[in-house]
Amino acid sequence: MNLAVIVVAVFFAGMGIAALVKPAFIWAPFGVAPTTPAARNEVRAVYGGFGLALAALLFVADSQSAGFRDGVLVAVAVALAGMAVGRLLGALVEPRPLLGWPGIFFLIETALAVLLLIAR
């Protein structure tokens, strides 16, 4: 398995596990607390289930045909790039949005997207 793919899969698995076990951990760096069952369910679904699904897909894709593998890597890279672009667009309407954790996550998302595209 390609090291770049492993790194991205582990990132998504870690995010997924953290969101399922402790939803507040995921939103805490942004000053948000999921204080209702519905909010915690949303964190578990979007960050937990999605993260684990992408991690599993990346691990499975690496053992599949080159076409399938490349398709998965591009799709996940585009998803990560979309997150990063969303942060940049947010920077157009919010003051100082990329300082602190948002900026760190922007860099991580960008780096992981590039890693996957290089790994193809």
Image (cartoon, grey):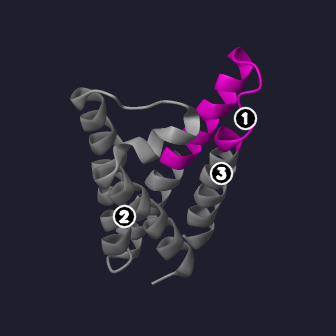
The kind of residue tagged 3 is: Thr
Q: Earlier in the sequence, mark 2 or mark 3?
A: 2
In three-dimensional space, the C-alpha distance between marks 1 and 3, rounded to whole angstroms, equals 13 Å
User: Which stretch appears magenta?
Assistant: 79-103
Element marked by disc 2: helix
Along the viewing direction, whichever of 35 and 20 lies nearer the viewer: 35
Side of 39 relative to 78 (left or right): left
Q: Position of residue 83 (x, y in %)?
A: 55, 39
Q: In the displayed image of the protein, which residue is found farthest to the top?
A: 93
Prevalent SS, magenta region: helix
Residue 55's disc is: 2
Residue 84: percent from left, percent from top: 62, 41
Quarter of the image for the N terminus: give it.
bottom left
Q: Is residue 74 left or right of residue 99?
A: left
Q: Quadrant of residue 98?
A: top right
Query: Badge 3: how crowded within 10 Å, few (<14), some, or many (20+)?
Result: some
Q: Which residue is mark 3?
A: 110
At numbered mark 1, what does the secondary structure look like: helix, strand or loop? loop
In the image, what residue type sits under mark 2? Ala
Residue 22 point in image, percent of width and height: 34, 50
Q: Are marks 2 and 3 in contact (CB under 8 Å)?
A: no
Q: Residue at x 48, y 30 (%)?
A: 32
Question: Which residue is identified by label 1?
Answer: 98
The reply to whether the magenta stretch includes residue 81 is yes
* Residue 66 to residue 51: above or below: below
Judging from the image, what secondary structure is the residue with disc 3 in?
Answer: helix
Q: Earlier in the sequence, mark 1 or mark 3?
A: 1
